[in-house]
Image (cartoon, helix red, strand yellow):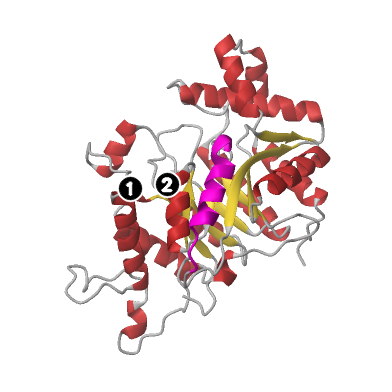
Amino acid sequence: MTADPAEEIRGTTQGTAPVPLSVLDLVTVGAGRTASDALRTSVQLARLAEARRFHRYWVAEHHSMPGVASSSPAVILAHLAAHTDRMRLGSGGVMLPNHAPLVIAEQFGTLEALAPGRIDLGLGRAPGTDGATAAALRRTDRLNEGADDFPEQLAELTRFLDDDFPDGHPYRRIHAVPGPVQATSPGGVQSPHRPPVWLLGSSGFSARLAGLLGLPFAFAHHFSAQNTVPALDLYRESFRPSAVLDAPYALIGVSALATDDEKEARRQVRAAALSMVRLRTGRPGLVPSPEEAEAYEFSPLEREFVDSWNANVIHGTADEVRAGLDGLQKRTGADELMITAAVHGGDVRVRSYELIADAYGLPTAG
């Protein structure tokens, strides 16, 4: 790793934003659009985010969801690395139990070789899908996401990333390539970087583990808002200084949508909420258009869910979104805000980040 790993973790505040701002991309696919359309939007959005000095751009792993085309974060990140120059790119996250640690180490070692010093490895312990799909991914019906297996998998992955299995370990002669072993081979020269590891969570488990290990922590406020403050408190209380960080560093994922007109923001988030209704009731599909959502007759129970869901989506005009983000950061003390906008149209998503950047006076490319 670098002499000061914290420099790759801590962002720099830009403009009038209270903390660094970043992007979480679910590569959402709207009705009437294709996965290719969604991926083109991701490239457009990544270029915009870099030009406006958003700190990092993460892609989340999901499976078996027609409206989310981010099943292969490493593939998407390689594509984004080819279209950007300096912004940090990473997983938000890779679901560690779905993959062999060696495979993740190889994938992210390859990404690090493609974009030296720009790659983050965010790890989660949830499947990122339903149980049956998780079983198909893992080739087993035994799904391990508990207190014993995840720390063990994390330790193994870290050993592969650092190439430091002890003598006598069965993996001592196995190396993740690209990786540190290349520097110790005859004539070898290897980059001093390796992707910093982040732990992701929506409850207290990963918060405590990240604190105990002295790692940066990312909390999924966008779908677990009621747990945000308790989890961040637990992370800070549990934190032990490490070779990575001497003090806690926590970002939170935030659903936020800015539009030129407040009414349009309400239309867009209503459609996104309908998509969540369908997902939560076992009917996942493409993200519906605002017109489809306006014509949909919500049941009383569904309307209650929509109201609850949208209460945690910061939306409206740029000034309203800025005020909402400022208030959320103040309430949580988050060190970084990672904004996601899982709406129907790619143009709406891109425009939202433009408006947020303008509201905070983020710099332009130059």
Residue in view at x 67 percent, y 23 percent: 290
Q: Residues within 10 Å of mark 2 (few under 14, many from 20)?
A: some
- Mark 2 lies on residue: 205
The quadrant holding residue 184 is bottom left
Name the main secondary structure of what is drawn in magenta. helix
Q: Position of residue 28 (x, y in %)?
A: 55, 37
Q: Is residue 299 visible?
A: no
Q: Position of residue 192 (x, y in %)?
A: 47, 79
Q: Residues within 10 Å of mark 1 (few under 14, many from 20)?
A: few
Residue in view at x 23 percent, y 70 percent: 174
> Going by the image, does 129 lie left or right of 288?
left
Q: Position of residue 124 (x, y in %)?
A: 42, 48
- Mark 1 lies on residue: 147
Q: Amino acid at mark 2?
A: Phe
Residue in view at x 41 percent, y 38 percent: 63
Residue in view at x 80 percent, y 38 percent: 320
Bounds of the magenta segment: 225-241
In the rendered image of this protein, does residue 136 appear above or below residue 234?
Answer: above
